[in-house]
Image (spheres, rainbow, N blue to C red):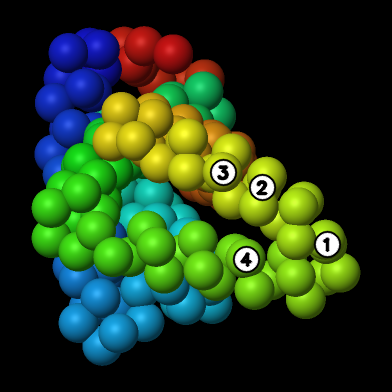
Amino acid sequence: MKTSTMLKHVANYGLVAGLILIAYSLFTYLIGQSLNKTLGYLSLVILAICLYIFSKQYRDKVNGGVLTYGQGFSVGLLVGIFAGILVTFFSVIELTYIDPSLIDKQLDMMEQQLLAKGMSEDQVEMAISMSKKWMTPGLMFIGGILSFAFWSALISLITAAVLKKNPSPFTENNSNE
């Protein structure tokens, strides 16, 4: 499979995965649970399901039923990165223009958690001021994409192992690694 063909498919899969994750994010926002950590972790489960389904679809529908470990990892990672670009862009728009108060709510929640852990007021204030420095649109975008790349790589290590299907040594396969 040529790299350009693979990129076309993973970009499409990433678009779909990104839209699914944006819809989930909108849902949690509309029900007032966008800061709920448990529901935040559920988005990782959704990402994992998307990476599994799209890697399997790539193997079965695009790559002739064959998927080396390297191909499986690459497909999953790239789908996750494409999805991450979309989701992170949406999140930055949401936090900057749609509901900037979410940042303040998040910082308030962080302050309460740090105080509950027994940190002094000065330590909490320093932690909050450091966090505020990272809450610019550019840094949020870079951090979001890096986070998606990390989680997608981790998930893809597993999905690639599960979905790996090497070509038969008795048939010719022109797939690239």
Q: Residue at x 30, y 28 (%)?
A: 138
Tag shown at residue 119:
1
Tag shown at residue 111:
4
Tag shown at residue 167:
none
Circles 3 and 1: CB atoms closer than 8 Å: no
* Residue at image mark 3: 129
Check the image and report above or below for 12 versus 34: above
Disc 2 from disc 4: Cα separation: 8 Å
The mark tally for this picture is: 4
Horizontal and vertical percent position of residue 44: 47, 60
Check the image and report above or below for 144 versus 30: above
Q: Residue furthest front?
A: 122
The crowd level at tag 3 (other Cα within 10 Å; few <14, some 14-19, many 20+) is few
In the rendered image, which quarter is residue 4 located in? top left
* Residue at image mark 2: 127
Residue type indicated by callout 2 = Ala
Circles 1 and 4: CB atoms closer than 8 Å: no
Horizontal and vertical percent position of residue 51: 39, 49
Residue type indicated by callout 4 = Glu
Question: Element type at marker 3?
Answer: helix
N-term mark: 4 or 3: 4
Left or right: where does residue 85 sit relative to residue 42? Answer: left
